[in-house]
Amino acid sequence: MKTHKVLLFVSFIIVLTFSSFIKSDEDLNDNKFIVVLDAGHGGRDPGNLGNGFKEKNIALSIVLKIGAILEKMPDFKVIYTRKKDVAVDLYKRPEIANKADADLFVSVHCDSHTSQAYGAGTFVMAVKKIPQNLSVAKKENEVIFLEDDYEKKYGGFNPNSPESLLGLSLIQEEYLDRSILIASLIQKKIITNLKRKDRKVKQDVFWVLHNTYMPSVLVETGFLTNKKEGTYLNSKKGQTEMARQIANGIIEYKKVIDQNVNDEIFVKDDDVVLTDTPVDTTSTNTLNDVIFKVQIAASSQALETKPYNFNGLQSISRLKEGAFYKYYYGATPNYDKVKQLEEEASKKGYTSGFIVAFKGGKKIALIDALKTTAN
């Protein structure tokens, strides 16, 4: 009897030990970098059909290949908005990413045009001004018309109306820096390694990006309406190569982020380059050490903060964050003044510039800075 009790006790210890191992594995899984891959269109929505190619099939093939690469890496977890030819409502795609508490959302598409345009481009959500050319976003947003009760689902949003775009929330503003970073890395991989025409990183108003609670990017891999490029993207070779470079961009993005884990910028003398223009202190709407600046650019290169490098703008400062340099126009404790600086930067061509805030040499959320200055 005593022996039986000892065996039961030993068995109990073994079960507890085994359970602790399982929990450890789950904890490790929880620490994985979660990427949501979104293959554009699907099911009843074929996407564009340039030269008879189907965007929905090409996007899905590329996404599955990206996922296969990332899934082989132990520190990545991949979630798909679709893994087969099914329709997924546009509003559900960011929902999938938000519910997964994802670290990154990447949507893959193919472009079209009435001309023989060609080349690859990446897009992030425009959070300040509505771009003048909405042709790309308009095409991608119009898929909502294929959905049942789209008027209710999208609250009266009309992809054909620029006024409707004003109603989109600015959730992505908080993640704009990182969205631009991942877009730039993916774009560079595609252009450099595949020798595609560079259509740059741009901002536009995409429904699928606007409501995600993480850095998000939409990749237009090329034009199906261009016979040569469409044939390439419709081939196994083209899809495999494109997937590899997008995956490489995602992998490099994670490495950059891991180098700057706490997501806070601490100002160091070696990292900052200031001009001779002093900080504006003339405002009556000020408080202590809260300073506003306009971020106008980010680059892997350390450019001289001279007017000729920034379309004639003076008062440029540079701050290193991880592997990248951020460039700021102006420095003032006055929020009204920094709004004027933002307009000045926009007139000089920096239409995607946005206001950031620092306190005690550390970057803080703009909303927190505004609360502080209001007290």
Image (cartoon, rainbow, N blue to C red):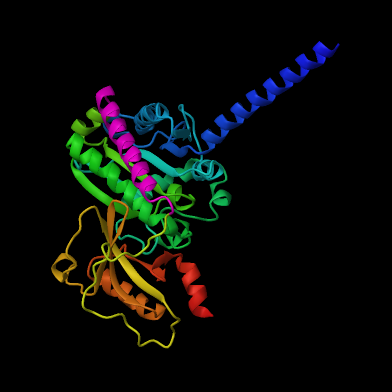
**Residue 300: x, y in percent?**
24, 52
Q: Is residue 328 above or below residue 203?
A: below
Q: Is residue 113 visible?
A: no
**Residue 201: x, y in percent?**
27, 50
**Most common secondary structure along the magenta stretch:** helix
Quadrant containing the N terminus is: top right
245 or 62: which is nearer to us? 245
- Magenta stretch encompasses residue 361: no
Quadrant containing the C terminus is: bottom right
**Residue 46: x, y in percent?**
40, 33
**Residue 271: x, y in percent?**
27, 62
Q: Is residue 316 visible?
A: yes
Quadrant assignment, res 307: bottom left
297 or 303: which is nearer to us? 303
Quadrant assignment, res 274: bottom left
Magenta range is 234-262
**Residue projecting furthest to the left:** 308
Does residue 82 appear left or right of residue 351 in this picture?
right
Residue at 24% over, 49% down: 200
- Magenta stretch encompasses residue 242: yes
Does residue 103 appear left or right of residue 124 in this picture?
right
Q: Is residue 245 above or below residue 375?
A: above
Q: Is residue 344 above or below residue 199?
A: below
